[in-house]
Amino acid sequence: MKKITVTLDEEVARWARIRAAEQNTSVSRLVREMLKEKMQEEEAYLLAMEQFLAAKPTCLKKPGERYPQREEVHER
């Protein structure tokens, strides 16, 4: 693992120490897990966006037809 130094506001450092104590872990591990979770969320979002953008668009109407009215699209 790579070591880094982080500078925190006193209030943030206090919050991190309390949160780490509540979870029976170190501040270092707490920060590591939070950053890892954030990275995984961003990767999942990017993958979902790529899959969405790769999907073939669907046409709402056939040539010569009108677009559906809002009520028709949102019928329940």
Image (tube, grey):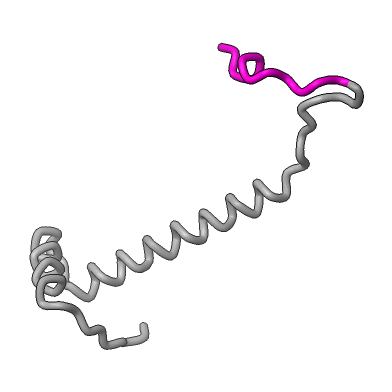
Q: Is residue 29 above or below residue 68?
A: below
In the depicted structure, whether residue 67 falls above or below residue 31: above
Residue 69 counted in the magenta span: yes
Q: In the image, 23: left or right of 57?
A: left
**From the viewer's perspective, is 3 left or right of 17?**
right
Q: Residue furthest top?
A: 76
Number of labels in the image equals: 0
Residue 23 sits in quarter: bottom left
Q: Residue at x 59, y 55 (%)?
A: 47
- When the figure is inspected, residue 34 is found, relative to residue 52, above or below; the finding is below
Q: Residue furthest right?
A: 64
Image quadrant in which the N terminus is located: bottom left
Q: Position of residue 71 (x, y in %)?
A: 61, 15
- Identify which residue is drawn at 8% across, 65% down: 18
In which quarter of the view is residue 2 placed?
Answer: bottom left
Residue toward you, 33 or 10: 10
Q: Residue at x 26, y 71 (%)?
A: 31
- Please, what is the dominant secondary structure of the magenta stretch? loop
Q: Which residues are magenta?
A: 65-76
